[in-house]
Image: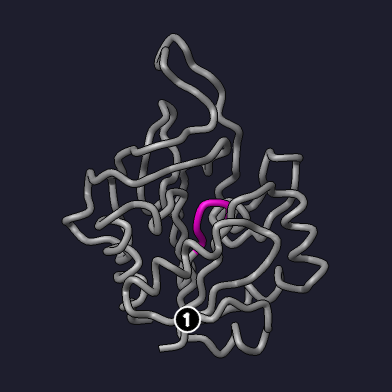
Amino acid sequence: MKVAIIKYNAGNIQSVDYALKRLGVEASVTADQEEIRAADRVIFPGVGEASTTMAYLREHHLDKLIVDLKQPVLGICLGLQLMCRHSEENNVKCLGIFEETVKKFVLQPDILPSMKIPHMGWNTITNLKSDLFDSSIEGQHCYFVHSFYATTGEDTAALCSYPTPFSAALQKNNFYAVQFHPEKSGIVGAKILENFLRLKI
Protein backbone atom coordinates (compact mmCIF):
# COMPACT_ATOMS: atom_id res chain seq x y z
CA MET A 1 0.00 0.00 0.00
CA LYS A 2 1.27 3.46 -0.93
CA VAL A 3 0.54 6.15 1.68
CA ALA A 4 1.31 9.79 0.96
CA ILE A 5 1.54 12.50 3.62
CA ILE A 6 1.07 15.89 1.98
CA LYS A 7 4.11 18.08 2.64
CA TYR A 8 3.33 21.78 3.00
CA ASN A 9 4.04 24.70 5.34
CA ALA A 10 2.46 23.16 8.43
CA GLY A 11 3.84 21.46 11.50
CA ASN A 12 3.17 17.99 12.89
CA ILE A 13 3.92 16.11 9.68
CA GLN A 14 6.84 14.14 11.11
CA SER A 15 4.87 12.91 14.13
CA VAL A 16 2.25 11.47 11.78
CA ASP A 17 5.01 9.78 9.78
CA TYR A 18 6.41 8.26 13.00
CA ALA A 19 2.95 7.02 14.02
CA LEU A 20 2.58 5.23 10.70
CA LYS A 21 6.04 3.68 11.08
CA ARG A 22 4.91 2.27 14.44
CA LEU A 23 2.12 0.54 12.49
CA GLY A 24 4.64 -0.87 10.03
CA VAL A 25 3.76 1.59 7.25
CA GLU A 26 6.45 3.48 5.33
CA ALA A 27 4.74 6.62 4.06
CA SER A 28 6.04 9.13 1.55
CA VAL A 29 6.15 12.74 2.79
CA THR A 30 5.73 14.62 -0.45
CA ALA A 31 4.36 17.63 -2.31
CA ASP A 32 4.71 15.90 -5.69
CA GLN A 33 1.25 15.94 -7.24
CA GLU A 34 1.67 12.78 -9.30
CA GLU A 35 2.94 10.86 -6.29
CA ILE A 36 0.00 12.05 -4.21
CA ARG A 37 -2.50 11.14 -6.92
CA ALA A 38 -0.99 7.67 -7.24
CA ALA A 39 -1.14 6.90 -3.52
CA ASP A 40 -3.68 4.43 -2.10
CA ARG A 41 -4.19 6.62 0.97
CA VAL A 42 -3.47 10.32 1.49
CA ILE A 43 -3.03 12.06 4.85
CA PHE A 44 -3.39 15.84 5.16
CA PRO A 45 -2.09 16.73 8.64
CA GLY A 46 -1.17 20.10 10.02
CA VAL A 47 -0.61 22.53 12.85
CA GLY A 48 -0.59 26.21 11.97
CA GLU A 49 -2.66 29.21 10.90
CA ALA A 50 -5.48 28.90 8.38
CA SER A 51 -5.09 31.92 6.09
CA THR A 52 -1.33 31.67 5.45
CA THR A 53 -1.66 27.94 4.94
CA MET A 54 -4.51 28.33 2.45
CA ALA A 55 -2.41 30.91 0.59
CA TYR A 56 0.44 28.40 0.41
CA LEU A 57 -1.85 25.63 -0.83
CA ARG A 58 -3.24 27.88 -3.57
CA GLU A 59 0.20 29.12 -4.61
CA HIS A 60 1.42 25.54 -5.04
CA HIS A 61 -1.86 24.30 -6.59
CA LEU A 62 -2.35 21.83 -3.77
CA ASP A 63 -5.84 23.17 -3.07
CA LYS A 64 -7.26 21.84 -6.34
CA LEU A 65 -5.28 18.63 -6.01
CA ILE A 66 -6.72 17.80 -2.58
CA VAL A 67 -10.32 18.47 -3.61
CA ASP A 68 -9.96 16.25 -6.70
CA LEU A 69 -8.53 13.21 -4.91
CA LYS A 70 -10.57 10.01 -5.25
CA GLN A 71 -8.83 7.72 -2.78
CA PRO A 72 -9.42 7.88 1.01
CA VAL A 73 -8.05 11.15 2.40
CA LEU A 74 -7.58 11.85 6.11
CA GLY A 75 -7.29 15.44 7.41
CA ILE A 76 -5.85 15.95 10.89
CA CYS A 77 -6.27 19.05 13.11
CA LEU A 78 -5.59 22.03 10.82
CA GLY A 79 -6.18 19.63 7.94
CA LEU A 80 -9.78 19.16 9.11
CA GLN A 81 -10.31 22.91 9.43
CA LEU A 82 -8.92 23.64 5.97
CA MET A 83 -11.25 21.02 4.49
CA CYS A 84 -14.25 23.02 5.77
CA ARG A 85 -16.02 25.84 3.92
CA HIS A 86 -14.70 28.87 5.81
CA SER A 87 -12.57 29.69 8.85
CA GLU A 88 -12.87 32.62 11.23
CA GLU A 89 -9.10 32.48 11.63
CA ASN A 90 -8.29 35.64 9.64
CA ASN A 91 -11.57 35.20 7.72
CA VAL A 92 -10.41 32.81 5.02
CA LYS A 93 -12.24 30.72 2.45
CA CYS A 94 -11.11 27.12 2.75
CA LEU A 95 -11.31 24.04 0.52
CA GLY A 96 -15.07 23.57 0.89
CA ILE A 97 -15.04 19.77 0.99
CA PHE A 98 -17.20 19.87 4.12
CA GLU A 99 -20.10 22.28 4.58
CA GLU A 100 -19.19 23.06 8.18
CA THR A 101 -17.49 26.32 9.18
CA VAL A 102 -14.63 26.91 11.60
CA LYS A 103 -15.15 29.22 14.58
CA LYS A 104 -13.00 30.44 17.44
CA PHE A 105 -13.60 29.09 20.93
CA VAL A 106 -15.07 31.69 23.29
CA LEU A 107 -14.50 31.50 27.04
CA GLN A 108 -17.64 30.41 28.90
CA PRO A 109 -16.79 30.83 32.61
CA ASP A 110 -20.42 30.37 33.70
CA ILE A 111 -20.54 26.92 32.14
CA LEU A 112 -16.91 25.81 32.39
CA PRO A 113 -14.94 27.93 34.89
CA SER A 114 -11.72 26.05 34.19
CA MET A 115 -11.95 26.63 30.43
CA LYS A 116 -8.77 27.80 28.73
CA ILE A 117 -7.97 28.48 25.09
CA PRO A 118 -6.51 26.58 23.32
CA HIS A 119 -8.47 23.45 24.10
CA MET A 120 -5.50 21.27 24.98
CA GLY A 121 -5.45 17.78 26.41
CA TRP A 122 -7.61 14.67 26.52
CA ASN A 123 -11.33 14.73 25.79
CA THR A 124 -13.94 12.16 24.85
CA ILE A 125 -15.37 11.55 21.38
CA THR A 126 -18.96 10.34 21.04
CA ASN A 127 -21.80 9.83 18.53
CA LEU A 128 -19.49 8.07 16.10
CA LYS A 129 -20.98 7.73 12.61
CA SER A 130 -18.08 6.78 10.36
CA ASP A 131 -16.34 3.56 9.37
CA LEU A 132 -13.22 5.37 10.53
CA PHE A 133 -14.33 4.22 13.97
CA ASP A 134 -15.61 1.02 15.53
CA SER A 135 -17.74 0.41 18.62
CA SER A 136 -14.70 0.12 20.91
CA ILE A 137 -13.82 3.80 20.27
CA GLU A 138 -17.16 5.29 21.42
CA GLY A 139 -16.57 7.47 24.50
CA GLN A 140 -12.79 7.04 24.42
CA HIS A 141 -10.34 9.88 25.04
CA CYS A 142 -8.30 11.50 22.28
CA TYR A 143 -5.71 14.27 22.41
CA PHE A 144 -6.71 17.76 21.24
CA VAL A 145 -4.77 21.01 20.74
CA HIS A 146 -6.76 23.75 19.01
CA SER A 147 -8.24 27.24 19.41
CA PHE A 148 -10.72 26.94 16.54
CA TYR A 149 -13.36 24.28 15.97
CA ALA A 150 -15.62 23.00 13.22
CA THR A 151 -19.35 23.45 13.75
CA THR A 152 -21.65 20.45 13.72
CA GLY A 153 -23.66 19.61 10.61
CA GLU A 154 -24.49 16.95 8.07
CA ASP A 155 -20.84 15.91 7.69
CA THR A 156 -20.23 15.46 11.44
CA ALA A 157 -18.90 11.97 12.15
CA ALA A 158 -18.03 12.38 15.85
CA LEU A 159 -18.77 14.88 18.58
CA CYS A 160 -16.77 16.48 21.37
CA SER A 161 -17.70 19.33 23.75
CA TYR A 162 -15.63 22.19 25.16
CA PRO A 163 -18.28 23.06 26.43
CA THR A 164 -19.87 23.88 23.04
CA PRO A 165 -20.45 20.71 20.99
CA PHE A 166 -18.19 20.63 17.93
CA SER A 167 -17.20 18.21 15.18
CA ALA A 168 -14.43 15.98 16.48
CA ALA A 169 -14.55 14.22 13.11
CA LEU A 170 -16.07 14.83 9.69
CA GLN A 171 -16.73 12.56 6.74
CA LYS A 172 -18.05 13.08 3.22
CA ASN A 173 -17.56 10.46 0.52
CA ASN A 174 -13.85 9.56 0.44
CA PHE A 175 -12.86 12.47 2.69
CA TYR A 176 -12.32 11.88 6.41
CA ALA A 177 -11.02 14.32 9.00
CA VAL A 178 -10.38 14.44 12.74
CA GLN A 179 -9.80 17.49 14.93
CA PHE A 180 -7.80 15.53 17.49
CA HIS A 181 -4.34 14.07 16.94
CA PRO A 182 -4.55 10.29 16.42
CA GLU A 183 -0.76 10.13 16.32
CA LYS A 184 -0.73 11.40 19.93
CA SER A 185 -3.80 9.52 21.16
CA GLY A 186 -2.20 6.25 22.21
CA ILE A 187 -3.91 2.95 21.48
CA VAL A 188 -7.17 4.65 20.42
CA GLY A 189 -5.39 6.87 17.91
CA ALA A 190 -3.44 3.93 16.51
CA LYS A 191 -6.69 2.04 16.02
CA ILE A 192 -8.21 4.97 14.14
CA LEU A 193 -5.19 5.17 11.84
CA GLU A 194 -5.41 1.42 11.26
CA ASN A 195 -9.10 1.74 10.41
CA PHE A 196 -8.28 4.47 7.90
CA LEU A 197 -5.64 2.32 6.23
CA ARG A 198 -8.12 -0.57 5.97
CA LEU A 199 -11.00 1.42 4.45
CA LYS A 200 -12.63 -0.11 1.41
CA ILE A 201 -13.82 2.53 -1.04
Residue 50 sits above or below residue 70 on the image: above
Label 1: few (<14), some (14–19) or many (≥20) C-alpha neighbours in 10 Å: many
> Which sits in the foreground, 149 or 11?
11
Q: Residue at x 44, y 29 (%)?
A: 164
Q: Is residue 1 left or right of residue 78?
A: left
Report if residue 51 lies within the magenta region: no
Q: Residue at x 53, y 40 (%)?
A: 146
Where disc 1 sits, the SS reads: strand
Three-letter residue code for mark 1: Val
Q: Residue at x 43, y 49 (%)?
A: 180
Residue 49 sits above or below residue 187 on the image: above
Q: Is residue 22 left or right of residue 134?
A: right
- Tell me where residue 37 sits by quadrant: bottom right
Q: Badge 1 is on which residue?
A: 3
Instruction: Give the x, y percent position of residue 51.
Output: 75, 49
Task: Count all numbered tags in the image, as a single digit.
Answer: 1
Instruction: Give the x, y percent position of residue 72.
Output: 45, 76
Residue 124 sits above or below residue 137 on the image: above
The span picked out in magenta is 75-79
- Tell me where residue 65 sits by quadrant: bottom right
**Quadrant of the snapshot with the N terminus:** bottom left
- Furthest toward the left, the residue is 136
Q: Is residue 39 left or right of residue 130?
A: right
Report if residue 77 lies within the magenta region: yes
- Tell me where residue 182 sits by quadrant: bottom left
Q: Residue at x 44, y 55 (%)?
A: 178
> Which sits in the foreground, 26 or 113?
26
Q: Is residue 138 left or right of residue 101?
A: left
Instruction: Give the x, y percent position of residue 78.
Output: 58, 52
Instruction: Give the x, y percent position of residue 131.
Output: 30, 66
